[in-house]
Amino acid sequence: MRKPIIVGNWKMNKTIAATKAFVEAVDPEVTDKADWGIATPYLALQTAKAGAKNLIVAAENVHFKDSGAYTGEVSVEMLKEIGVEWVILGHSERRQYFGETDETVNAKMLQVLKNDMTPIVCVGETLEQYEAGTTKDVVKTQVVAAYKDVCPKCASRSVIAYEPVWAIGTGKTATNEIAQDVCGYIRSVVAELYGQEVADQVRIQYGGSVKPEGLKALLEQPDIDGALVGGASLVEDSYKAMIAALD
Ligand SMILES: O=C[C@H](O)COP(=O)(O)O
C-alpha cells in the first residue's frame, strides 16, 4: 500500500517571514493520512526546516555537480547541511524557462539519489503535444531519460509527478480519468524498466490546478498516489483544507 504524498510547490513565492508564519500555522495540523510537504525557494528552506516537525521540506531544484564554478547554483551538500533531503527535479517551468533538459534531469537524479536524497521528478506534455495525441510518447521519453543508469533500489524510493503543462496554473485540471490513464501508463513504463515490484513502490503524483475539493477523488484513482500542488498550497487555509479533505 503506497502512502499518499502531497507536496506544495511554492515556486518563486513567499518571503522568509511568510514561510515562518505558514509553517507555524500549518505544521501542527498535519495528519498521518499522507506525507505532507512544501517545496520552498532556497532562501526559505532553513526557516521552513526549523519550524517543520511534520512537514517534509523540499528544494525546488539542485545542481548535478558536487561543487565548482557554477554561479547562482546550489549543491546537494548545501541542502543536506540544512537537513533538506527532498528535491523537485525537472519541473516544466525549469524545462521551459531555464534550459532544463532530459539529460540534466537525469544527471540531477543520479546526484540526488547517490546522496540518499529523494527526488520528485516531473514529467508532462505541453498543450500542443496533448492536442497532437502524443502525451504518452512524451512522458515515456521523459521517464526513460530521467531514470537512465538509476538502480532499481533507488528508483523504488523516488517519486514521479505527472504534470500536464496545459493544466499548470491555468485552472484547467485534467479529468481524474485522464490523470489516471497517464499515471497508470507511467507506472507501466517503470515496470518495463525495473519490473512490477519496483513499479508498485514508486509513488506517482498528479499536478496541475489541484484544489482541496478535488483532492480526495483524485487520490481514489488506483495509480495516483498524491499531488504536487502549486497555487492551492500557498494559502494556509487552502493547505489546511487539503489536510482536512483526507481526514
Ligand atoms: O508544481 C506544481 C504545479 O506546477 C501545479 O501548479 P498549480 O497547482 O498552480 O496548477
Image (cartoon, rainbow, N blue to C red):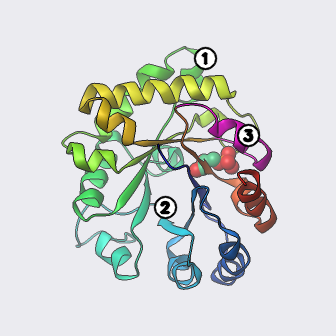
Report the magenta residues as a range. Answer: 208-222
Residue at the spot 38% in from the left edge and 34% down from the top edge: 142
SS of the residue at dot 1? helix
Q: Earlier in the sequence, mark 3 or mark 1?
A: 1
Judging by the rendered image, the residue that carries numbered circle 1 is: 131
Quadrant for the C terminus, please.
Answer: bottom right
Residue 232 in magenta?
Answer: no
- Element carrying mark 2: loop
Q: Position of residue 73 (x, y in %)?
A: 37, 69
Mark 2 and mark 1 residues within 8 Å of each other at the beta carbon: no
Q: CA gap, disc 2 to disc 1? A: 29 Å
Q: Amino acid at mark 2?
A: Glu
Residue 57 screen position, x and y as percent: 51, 69
Seen in the picture, residue 33 relative to 145 is either above or below; the reply is: below
The answer to whether 235 is drawn above or below residue 212 in the figure is: below
Mark 2 or mark 1: which is in front? 2
Q: CA distance from mark 2 to mark 3?
A: 20 Å
| Residue lying farthest to the top in this orientation | 133
User: What is the three-letter code of the residue carrying label 1?
Assistant: Glu
Q: Which mark is residue 92?
A: none
Image position, residue 113 (x, y; %): 27, 57
Mark 2 or mark 3, earlier in chain: 2
- At x 76%, y 63%, the residue is 240
Pinpoint residue 53: horizontal percent, then vertical percent.
Answer: 56, 78
Image mark for residue 60: 2
